[in-house]
Amino acid sequence: MIKIAVLGHGIVGSGVVEVIEKNKSAIEKKLLDKIEVKYILDIRSFPDLPYHEKFIKDFSIIEQDPEIKVVAEVMGGVEPAFDFSMRCLRAGKSVVTSNKELVAVKGDILLAEARKYKANYLFEASVGGGIPIIRPMFRCLSANEITEIYGILNGTTNFILTQMVQEHMSFPDALAQAQQLGYAERNPAADIEGIDALRKICILASLAFGRHVHTQHAFAEGISAIELSDVRFARQAGYEIKLVAQTRKADDDRLIVFVSPALVSQQNMLAQVKGVFNAVLIRGNVVGDILLYGQGAGKLPTASAVVADIIEAAKHDRYLPGFGWESCEENIVVPQQEVAARYYLRLRNCIMAQVQKIYGMVEFVAQDDENLAVITPSMSGAAHCVLQEKLEQAGGQLLSAIRVLDI
Amino acid sequence: MIKIAVLGHGIVGSGVVEVIEKNKSAIEKKLLDKIEVKYILDIRSFPDLPYHEKFIKDFSIIEQDPEIKVVAEVMGGVEPAFDFSMRCLRAGKSVVTSNKELVAVKGDILLAEARKYKANYLFEASVGGGIPIIRPMFRCLSANEITEIYGILNGTTNFILTQMVQEHMSFPDALAQAQQLGYAERNPAADIEGIDALRKICILASLAFGRHVHTQHAFAEGISAIELSDVRFARQAGYEIKLVAQTRKADDDRLIVFVSPALVSQQNMLAQVKGVFNAVLIRGNVVGDILLYGQGAGKLPTASAVVADIIEAAKHDRYLPGFGWESCEENIVVPQQEVAARYYLRLRNCIMAQVQKIYGMVEFVAQDDENLAVITPSMSGAAHCVLQEKLEQAGGQLLSAIRVLDI
């Protein structure tokens, strides 16, 4: 009998209990053993739940119970999740989590502690909800050098952008709808400003390249500045606007890691990812491009990934060697000013000839009474700022600048 | 030091050797050990290769060498691959393979032998080439009841259909081009007639539902009858024609397993899968829909999956419990006559009123001087045959009948 504890009975935590009950026979067939949720830790009480007697408020009961071999930390936030996770690992218990904030901030420390105490620290659910990403990347693409990862890693913003494209809703209206439907995370700013996607791409970059990438070193730009006219102009030129998270190795051993809106060609599979779905493309030097797609959030999809990690941790009574990454305190991320991209620009008060004089051979996208939309040649973030100044000195006005995803 | 043997130095076998050399440092980091190809078994000699001294012609050298812990069987075909694989397993050596024919025919027997001798029999490369499918399905979706799997599992036919759509090439011309580009397998009939895709969906059905599904019980229809006019009419109605492999549980514990051309809605991600790429959609009862996409064939992508299995097998000196499925001699596949679908029909010598009298409320698709294209209500394969007869008795002519993928 495998006995587990669940830390936190929020959306994901209650989903974990539900999935274990719902699919018990399938799970036990995989486990080759019985499974039982012995404790659920939460500051609240749930007297009406049929499993109300499992709730406890004192973490040390879990910590000190030798029957508990696997703990699911689904509380979210850094503390007390970090403290509890470290104490579980030190007690030789494996920890599985959906907590992307904690993995992004303290993943290296937790992985080192897991190694030290021969326990597992698994976090499949922290990136892409129910989509298998972490394990396929580490285990199935293990014969590859990973060269690049990019994708749509936040369902809330993708839902908003989809509504803007398909229903011609403005950003504020689409955001309101997302909140109404419960697609927004507890703190909507983390979604909208790209912080949630940044945490996830930092986790993937750490795993792919072996060193901890700190979110505060990487760049995030959200979607709150995207206007309907940008969505419309982009479509006319054969692109969809998506919030894209991206990482790759730079030429000098540093990493490029950032999140920003991007024009994605309609020929790219990412452009077809609609609503709350996520997709991540992983490029390996022998396998080529792999795309993994599915529901990136939500109670049951996320719980599906947490429970898969519980099964994995329970089957391996010893730790999985080689999984994870090393600590790295230095800043290994290329500053955004050095990263080159083509830019979609929406301009006012200027004509094509002026724009070409400043930016070089720009590509015409579309035009209406007020706006001129173009795509520039590739330039660094720094050059982009310099040229914007030039444009404004010439009397032009830059209303939008969105990079183009060139892959 | 992990010493391995490679059985067969064809496209995949030479790719395995190449990938191990090319990415040795990344692979050894994952392995936490050194790796070396000690033997390559082939009936041919390759005196000009830098590693020509590794070639042997006598399998028993591998069988009897206790240093060899993992063997990659990349010969293809049932014999002698089956004999060699069984002898490796009996000698306690793990076997990894890309041989879909062998896994489809003898997978249950090989898995049982692996269990008996506590070795691993792994076959990630047998389905979808380099795309992670088998392991994500078994390990990452382990908290799910799998309810349905469908996808594009043959790159050759998808390349041909893409050329028909995008370049307006006829089927014979597109086939000739596929052969010229080396996209066809050794036996092109296996691709064109859907046999290759059927082997793969039978492997996935066996893994998902736990019992060996024999290819001879399942139904395969290829793409050789698809005409350009069908491709064109389908597009007008918002569909692409794809060769789709599909499996799901029937209501009565039997399975639906088949391969056939299908009209896929352009809203479905599968419709966006172009050229030699493959994609498989897995539906789990808690995770929802997961799509895995990438290069389904080719030397290096396939070798990428074989080498990932080598790493997995080498890291687990004991076998992975619970992986695989049971033997099943009875026919558990629902006969195609009982499977219901809507059908796209291309007809001649009849008018809409006649068609509706015979088929019920059909949906008009398109029409030209000669052809009338419609989509019927859902009906069983048996009903489809009966109504075709009625149509022909009324003087009508049925030129094409292609099912519609309704998911």
Image (spheres, coloured by chain):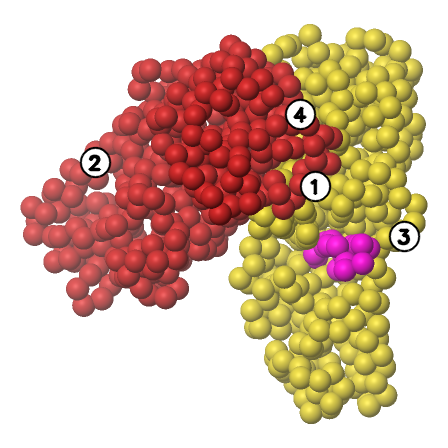
Chain colours: A yellow, B red
Binning the other alpha carbons within 10 Å of mark 2 as few (below 14), some (14 to 19) or many (20 upward) gives some
Subunit that carries the residue with mark 2: B
Q: Amino acid at mark 3?
A: Asn
From this view, report whether residue B319 is shown above or below residue B369.
Answer: above
Q: Residue at x 82, y 67 (%)?
A: A338
Label 2, on which residue?
A: B383
Mark 2 element type: helix
Say which mark, if any, is on residue B26: 1
Q: Position of residue B373 (x, y in %)?
A: 25, 57
**Marks 1 and 2, the one that precedes in the sequence:** 1
Say which of marks 2 and 4 sits in front: 4
Label 4, on which residue?
A: B315
Label 3, on which residue?
A: A331
Q: Amino acid at mark 1?
A: Ala
Binning the other alpha carbons within 10 Å of mark 1 as few (below 14), some (14 to 19) or many (20 upward) gives some
Q: Position of residue A357 (x, y in %)?
A: 74, 90
Mark 1 element type: helix
Question: Which segment is the magenta one?
Answer: A243-260
